[in-house]
Structures are given as structure tokens and as C-alpha cells.
Image: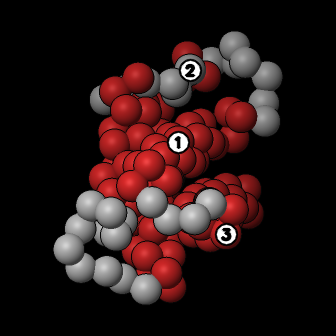
Amino acid sequence: MTPRRVAVALFDLALVAFLGAAARLAHVFWYRTFESSVAVDLAGSVAVGVVFAAGHLLVASGDRVVTPAGRDADTLVVRPRSIAVAVAAGFLLHASQAPAFTPFGLTPTGVNRVLAIGGVAVGLWSLAVRRATRSGS
């Protein structure tokens, strides 16, 4: 394994961890800014979905985000279906534990952990999407 491949692998894992942290931070900042209600919980679910979609785009694009477009055939990683899946994953993950929609309640710390783990899972899936895109499958 070359040093460049090690650096790329570390960068990829950093992006995945960043997506998990971004989901957690979005949740923390959202509920520090707004008081909990049905509308706020619904909007929070949408916000987490948007964070997951943005993170998916960043992770699935990888080094193509910081290199000039048009270098090769896989510069376009934007796939509407995979972005929709990322939005749905974030939305459903948050809505499944929002107090307005569920009879049980997790503490804010528990919700943050679940969102961080979900963000990492979406990040790992995004890496798989990138690899599949680049291999042509």
C-alpha cells in the first residue's frame, strides 16, 4: 500500500466521521435554537435529512470535490436516487425518535448518539457508492 493510498483512506474515514459529527451537531444546534414542538420536530427531521444528503455528496465525491471537473468520466457523482436515499435516511432516523412522533423518548444524548451512528453508516454507504461509481458498476 502506497503512502498516497493510506492518505486517501484516512481522508475517506475522516469524511465519514465528519458526517457522523455533522448529524450530531445539527441536532444539538437545532434544539438549542428552537423549542420542541411537532413542527420543530418535523423541520428538524428535514434538516437532518439535508445534512445527510450534503454529507453523502461530499463523501461520494471524495477527492473530486477539490479537483477540477472534467478530469475523467467519474467526476459527476451526483445521483438523484442516492441523494434521495440519504435525505430519507436522515429524515426517518430523526423522525423515528422525535418525541412528537413516537411514544417513547430518548434523552438528547441518546438521540445524538443514534444520529452520529446513522451519519457514519450513511458515510460508509457513500464510500461504497463512490467505489461502485468509479468501478463502473
Q: Is residue 87 visible?
A: yes
- Foreground label between 3 and 2: 3
> Could you say where residue 114 lies in the image, as x and y percent from the top left?
40, 74
Q: Which residue is mark 1?
A: 50
Residue 107's tag is: none
Amino acid tagged 2: Leu
Locate the N terminus and report the quarter of the image it occupies. Answer: bottom right
Q: Residue at x 52, y 27 (%)?
A: 77
SS class, disc 2: loop
Asked if 23 appears above or below 43 in the picture, the reply is: below
Of circles 3 and 1, which is in front? 3
Q: Which residue is mark 3?
A: 32
- Label 1 and label 2: CA atoms lie apart by 20 Å
Instruction: Name the amino acid type tagged 1.
Output: Val
Q: Quadrant of the C terminus?
A: top left
- Helix, strand or loop at mark 1: helix
Q: Position of residue 28 (x, y in %)?
A: 62, 70
Asked whether the viewer can see residue 128, the reply is no
Can you tell which quarter of the image residue 23 is in?
Answer: bottom right
State whether residue 74 is above or below residue 11. Answer: above
- Sequence order check: which comes first, mark 3 or mark 2? 3
Cα distance, mark 3 to mark 1?
Answer: 18 Å
